[in-house]
Image (cartoon, helix red, strand yellow):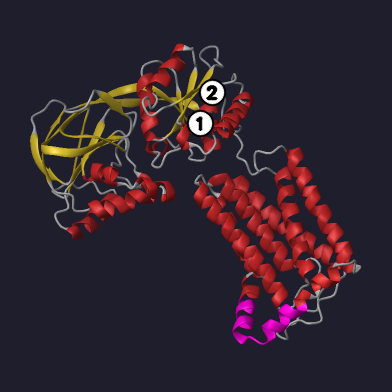
């Protein structure tokens, strides 16, 4: 819906509002067959009169979705959106308030009296068409549907939200009929009015975010600005490749870039070959859309090339994007990639037994954290996202303690015991957990943390210390920093790079390459 042309949205809004006016005229003048349809409300109200429990339930719905209830829900929605998504917040408030005002004016214009069969409890004597409860509930449901379509990526979650919205709107409509407060045509009219105003609102004020660069200072141009753009896309990470391509092409054109060339990753090549092909064809900016694994492959291939990488996060963790303040909303991320500023960040070379030499951008781990990645159920991950990692973590809490040796900057090896060791180029995990709060992606250093809760209950004080960013080190939490890190385990242990599991082994050798890669970040 949000990608439709304004002319199309305006046409659909006009259809809804025209049907509303036609229904209002027909209902108030008694055009057949509407009187017969409206008489169904008498039978529904008769059922309510003889069922006390149903009457109390309907009265509760009437109160919750009355004017003050809808107003409170709208305030909560706007408050939740205002900080990070101001335009959807303004759109939501505008549509709901407009619906309230327009409905109030129209109810007097049509001047239709209430049904004579109202259930005798809090009987209303105001005019009836269109239903205020139906209109405001449908308007709030409509703007929530727009927000869900705008911000929620997972199709299953969106479908569940749309279904719930539909059930609520239908339920409130039935409530008005079974209490005898409105004729069925009043309810249908209220929904048509709301739908028309929701669509008209999209025409008048688009909730799509504006470019973050509009109010930013112009970037300093050190030379002629190129316009050749390439996109590396993991096709399984977007719902529609064609729709994603259309969005990028439109936004690229608006930002002054040429029509992008496209490179889709495969199972056999998760991004390296595509990045090198983009470099060979002379791309002056490469957008990569995928999870942390795809991003890692593209960044490693373009390291040292001087070609900036724009990250469009489409995975589950998206840790690199989070730590670079790249927005997770796809349109906003594309905007940052096209109009943001370049930042030189570190890349980490890594090698070890049973693995080829490679790189990582975010972090490497051995032990408990790698076991979490390896034990994640992919089907559950597709349904609930990063919460699947939480479930996997609960299963792996008592991963066996490892005996480790660690060398920092080619120094002597020191012996340790830990359930997990993480070497990070960035500091924050999902949900903003500050596992390595002092880590910086552009300081030329690697930060190491060893966690060793001896008992199940030891995880609680460990979590408190991590969330509190406490710097004290001991056997429970130990920290180190250096340009090169070597970790050796006494036996084969699960390992991971940027959230992707690799072959279990006993050693990881890591070296930070300072300022090796250019990445687009917000201005």
Q: Position of residue 287 (x, y in %)?
A: 48, 26
- Residue that mark 2 sits on: 219
Q: Which residues are magenta?
A: 42-60
Residue 44 falls inside the magenta stretch? yes
Give the camera-side residue of 224 and 252.
252
Location of residue 2 in the rendering, given as x and y in whole percent from the top left corner: 65, 42
Return the residue at label 1. Answer: 523
The picture quadrant where one finds residue 217 is top right
- Residue 20 vs 173, above or below: the answer is above
Considering the numbered disc 1 on the image, is that residue within a helix, a strand or a loop?
loop
The kind of secondary structure the magenta stretch mainly shows is helix
Question: Alpha carbon of mark 2 to alpha carbon of mark 1: how far?
Answer: 9 Å
Disc 2 element: loop
Query: Residue 321 at x, y = what percent?
Result: 42, 36
Position of 218 with respect to 67 (left or right) is: left
For the point 90% across and 66% down, the residue is 31
How far from the left and from the top, in percent, is residue 316?
Answer: 40, 42
Please say if 1 is above or below 24. Answer: above
Neighbour tally class for label 1: few under 14, some 14-19, many 20 plus, Cα within 10 Å: some
Q: Quadrant of residue 185?
A: bottom right
**Residues at circles 2 and 1 in contact by the CB criterion of under 8 Å:** yes
**313 or 88: nearer the eye?**
313
Can residue 68 be seen at all in this image of the molecule?
yes
User: In the rendered view, would you say 242 is above or below 416?
Assistant: above
Q: Residue at x 29, y 51 (%)?
A: 392
Q: Name the residue rendered at 42%, 46% in the picture.
A: 382
User: Disc number at residue 184?
Assistant: none
Number of numbered discs on residues:
2
Judge whether residue 355 is colored magenta.
no
């Amino acid at each position: 819906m949000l990608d439709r042309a304004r002319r199309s949205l305006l046409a659909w809004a006009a259809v809804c509002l025209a049907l509303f006016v036609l229904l209002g005229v027909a209902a108030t003048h008694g055009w057949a067959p509407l009187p017969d349809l409206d008489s169904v409300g008498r039978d529904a109200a008769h059922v309510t009169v003889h069922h006390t429990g149903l009457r109390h339930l309907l009265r509760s719905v009437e109160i919750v979705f009355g004017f003050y209830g809808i107003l409170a829900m709208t305030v909560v929605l706007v408050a939740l959106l205002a900080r990070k998504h101001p335009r959807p917040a303004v759109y939501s408030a505008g549509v709901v308030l407009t619906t309230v005002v327009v409905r109030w004016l129209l109810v007097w214009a049509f001047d239709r009296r209430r049904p004579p069969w109202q259930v005798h409890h809090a009987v209303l004597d105001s005019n009836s068409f269109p239903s205020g409860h139906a209109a405001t509930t449908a308007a709030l449901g409509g703007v929530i549907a727009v927000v869900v379509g705008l911000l929620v990526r997972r199709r299953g979650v969106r479908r569940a939200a749309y279904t719930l919205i539909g059930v609520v709107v239908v339920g409130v409509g039935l409530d008005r009929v079974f209490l005898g407060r409105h004729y069925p045509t009043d309810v249908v009219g209220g929904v048509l009015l709301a739908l028309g105003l929701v669509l008209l609102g999209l025409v008048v004020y688009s909730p799509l975010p504006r470019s973050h660069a509009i109010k930013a200072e112009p970037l300093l141009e050190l030379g002629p600005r190129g316009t050749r753009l390439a996109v590396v896309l993991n096709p399984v990470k977007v719902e529609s490749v064609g729709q994603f391509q259309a969005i990028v092409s439109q936004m690229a054109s608006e930002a002054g870039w040429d029509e992008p060339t496209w490179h889709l990753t495969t199972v056999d090549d998760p991004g390296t070959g595509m990045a090198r092909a983009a470099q060979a064809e002379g791309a002056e900016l490469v957008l990569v859309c995928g999870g942390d694994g795809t991003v890692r492959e593209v960044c490693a291939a373009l390291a040292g090339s001087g070609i900036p990488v724009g990250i469009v996060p489409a995975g589950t963790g998206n840790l690199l994007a989070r730590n670079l303040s790249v927005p997770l909303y796809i349109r906003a991320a594309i905007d940052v990639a096209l109009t943001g500023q370049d930042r030189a960040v570190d890349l980490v070379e890594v090698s070890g037994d049973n693995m080829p030499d490679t790189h990582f951008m975010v972090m490497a781990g051995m032990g408990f954290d790698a076991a979490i990645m390896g034990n994640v159920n992919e089907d559950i991950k597709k349904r609930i996202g990063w919460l699947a990692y939480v479930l996997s973590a609960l299963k792996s809490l008592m991963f066996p303690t490892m005996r480790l040796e660690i060398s920092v900057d080619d120094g002597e090896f020191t012996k340790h015991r830990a359930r997990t060791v993480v070497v990070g180029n960035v500091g924050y995990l999902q949900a903003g957990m500050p596992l390595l709060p002092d880590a910086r992606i552009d300081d030329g250093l690697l930060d190491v943390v060893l966690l060793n809760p001896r008992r199940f209950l030891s995880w609680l004080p460990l979590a408190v210390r991590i969330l509190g960013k406490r710097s004290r080190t001991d056997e429970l939490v130990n920290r180190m920093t250096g340009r090169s890190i070597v970790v050796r385990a006494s036996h084969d242990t699960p390992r991971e790079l940027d959230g992707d599991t690799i072959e279990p082994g006993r050693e990881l050798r890591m070296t930070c390459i300072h300022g090796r890669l250019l990445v687009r970040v917000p201005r």
